[in-house]
Amino acid sequence: MFSLNPDEAKLAPEESDMVSLKPGAIRAERERKPMTASRLLRRIVQIGAWGILLWVAAVFWLGLSYALIPPVSTLMLGRWLTLQPVTRDFVSLKEISPHLSLAVMTSEDSLFCQHSGVDWQAIREVVEAADEDGPARGASTIPMQTAKNLFLWPGRSYVRKGLELPVALYLDLIWPKTKMMENYLNIAEWGDGIFGAEAAARAYFRKSVKDLTRREAALLATALPNPLVRNPARPSRSHAARAATILARMESAAPYAGCLKD
C-alpha cells in the first residue's frame, strides 16, 4: 500500500478532469474556451496569409494555362455566378482585324511593344502629378489591364494597383506580345454582358471582328475606358471625336506595332 502526496490528492476539479481526458478531448476542451483578442488576431492573420498564398498560386498556374486555353475574366465569372448572361466568342489574334489591334494599342498603350508590362515613366508622371484627391489617371498598360481583368477587381485603389504591377510583369514575362493582345481583346468588356472583340463586333456592327473597318476599330477601341456608357454603333460627339483622333494617330503608330505581327 502507498499513500498519495497531499498536494496530488488536492487537484482542482478542472485539473482532475483534464487528467482523465484523452489528448483529442483535451484539445476540444481548450477550443471551447472563449477566444481572446490575440488569438482572434492570430487566426485572422493565418487566414489572410493562406488566402494570399492561394491567390499567388492561382495567378501562377492560371497564367501558364491561359497561354494555351481561353481565359476567363473575374467580371465574366461574377456574371456566371449571379446567373447573368455572358456573350463571348474566343477568336485568335489572326482572326481579329489588325485595325483593331492597332487602334487599341494606339488608344490604350502606345508603348505596348517597348515596355515589359509596366510603363514606369508613365506611372512616375502620374504619381508626381497627383493631388490630395489622388491620381487623375491610372497609367495602366494593356498587361496591367489584362492582369486586373483576369485576377483582380474593378475600381480604383492603391491596393489593387499594387497587386496589378507584379501580375502584369509576370504575364508579360511568360506570354509573347501577340498572346497578351489576343487575351486582352478576348476578355475586354464592351457592354453589358458583352466580352471580347468578336462579340462586340457582332453586337455593334453586325459583322465578324476580322471584317472591321479602320473607323469601326477606332470606335471600339475608344469605347473601352467606359464600355457601359459608350456605344460604338451610336457614338456621342465626344466619343466620335476621340475615335477620329485615334484614327489619325494609327498611321504614325503602325511602325511601333511590329510586336503584333507573328
Image (cartoon, helix red, strand yellow):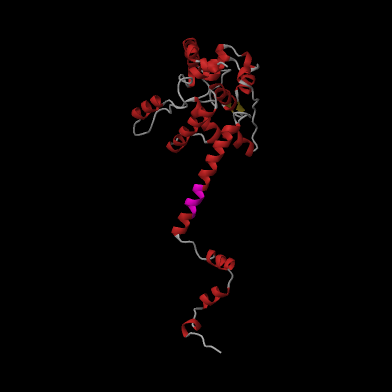
Residue in the foreground of this view, choosing between 131 and 233: 131
Query: Chief secondary structure of the magenta span?
Result: helix
Q: Is residue 204 left or right of residue 245?
A: right
- Total marks placed: 0
Outermost residue on the bottom side: it is 1
Residue drawn at the location 54% of the way across and 73% of the way down: 18
Q: Is residue 216 left or right of residue 129?
A: right
Outermost residue on the front side: it is 1
Say if residue 73 shows up in the picture.
Answer: no
State which region is magenta: 43-49
Residue in the foreground of this view, choosing between 186 and 244: 186
Say if residue 163 shows up in the picture.
Answer: yes
Residue drawn at the location 49% of the way across and 47% of the way down: 49
Q: Position of residue 220 (x, y in %)?
A: 55, 19
Q: Position of residue 16 (x, y in %)?
A: 53, 77
Q: Quadrant of residue 217?
A: top right
Question: Is-magenta flag for residue 45?
Answer: yes
Residue drawn at the location 53% of the way across and 22% of the way down: 177
- In this rendering, the answer to whether 235 lies above or below 130 is above
Residue in the foreground of this view, choosing between 139 and 84: 139
Q: Is residue 17 left or right of residue 163?
A: right
- In this rendering, the answer to whether 257 lies above or below 77 is above
Question: Is-magenta flag for residue 166?
Answer: no
Q: Position of residue 143 (x, y in %)?
A: 50, 27
Q: Which quadrant would the C terminus be assigned to in this image?
A: top right
Q: Which quadrant would the N terminus be assigned to in this image?
A: bottom right
Q: Position of residue 20 (x, y in %)?
A: 57, 75
- In this rendering, the answer to whether 19 lies above or below 178 is below
